[in-house]
Amino acid sequence: PVMYVPNDLTFTSSKAAMEFGGSLGEAEAQLINAGLEDKVPLFRVFVKILLEYEKGENSPWYTWLNSLPRIYNTGASMTYACFDCLPPYAAWLALTERQNFVNFQKAAKFTPLGEDIVTNVTVLKWAYNVAITRSIEWYGDRCIAPMADMLNHGTETEVEVSYDENGDCYVYTTTDVAAGSPLRMSYGDPTNPSPLFATYGFLDESSPGTFCKLMHMRTEMEVLGYWFSDL
């Protein structure tokens, strides 16, 4: 391995659930009622990030949090003027991210976080972007391993991230890497770059995919067993 992050330094939705106990129940119910049951693990990481932000310099993760970007170009950060300028498929994905954030914002009011946090849209949007861009899904859990989250995306990758049974994070090389070369992992399907754009806010110029999608034929596509990545 080229990097090791012990379990006690990681953010995971399962650990957040244990830490908060039942205090997130009403907030999670709000998400479930909005049709976002699959986003509950991400929401738990989102709340944990906000809790540590609320602690300021008293948080053991203060240095890491302070190193993170303040500005994001993700779908959650876009305006309706942005959506109007995008191709239909990219616009739909970006708007979905924006709607997900709005639902997280509403649900945050039912968490034990302070009033100054849950009413601060700028901080909420920042925490959402941190959670969505720096976490990975690992067998149903959402996980952030500080430092490992700094790895960039590449169509051609040099490393993979994994977690062991103890929750420790390891980054392994998948090929010989020359000194001075980047270490990149995959953030998603390189043949379907629009989700990368909506979620992470960048375009992968090395991706072989395109943005030309048949948005008006989604029902027919599903019946035939196809999705946008197949086009």
Image: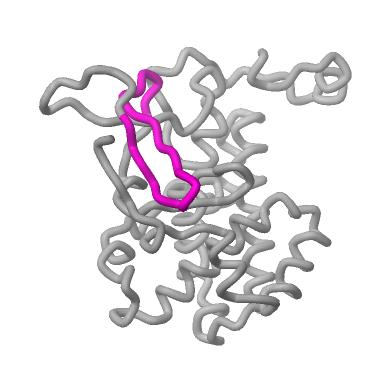
Against 107, residue 141 (above or below) is: above
Please identify the quarter of the rendering in which residue 109 is found. bottom right
Looking at the rendering, in which quadrant would you find the N terminus? top left
Magenta residue span: 154-172
How is the model colour-coded? Answer: one colour
- Viewed as shown, does residue 158 lie left or right of 16? left
Task: Residue at 26%, 60% (x, y): give it.
Answer: 67
Q: Position of residue 74 (x, y in %)?
A: 49, 46
Q: Position of residue 63 (x, y in %)?
A: 25, 67
Task: Residue at 55%, 81% (x, y): give it.
Answer: 113
Q: Position of residue 175 (x, y in %)?
A: 29, 18
Please identify the quarter of the rendering in which residue 218 is found. top right
Residue most toward the left? 179
Looking at the rendering, in which quadrant would you find the C terminus? top right
Residue 218 vs residue 154, the one in the foreground: 154
Please identify the quarter of the rendering in which residue 59 is found. bottom left
Residue most toward the bottom? 115
Residue 211 vs residue 56, the one in the foreground: 56
Q: Position of residue 155 (x, y in %)?
A: 40, 21
Against 200, residue 13 (above or below) is: below
Membership of 162 in magenta stretch:
yes
Against 98, residue 112 (above or below) is: below
Task: Residue at 46%, 47% (x, y): give it.
Answer: 133
Number of marks drawn: 0
Against 52, residue 211 (above or below) is: above
Task: Residue at 63%, 78% (x, y): give it.
Answer: 111
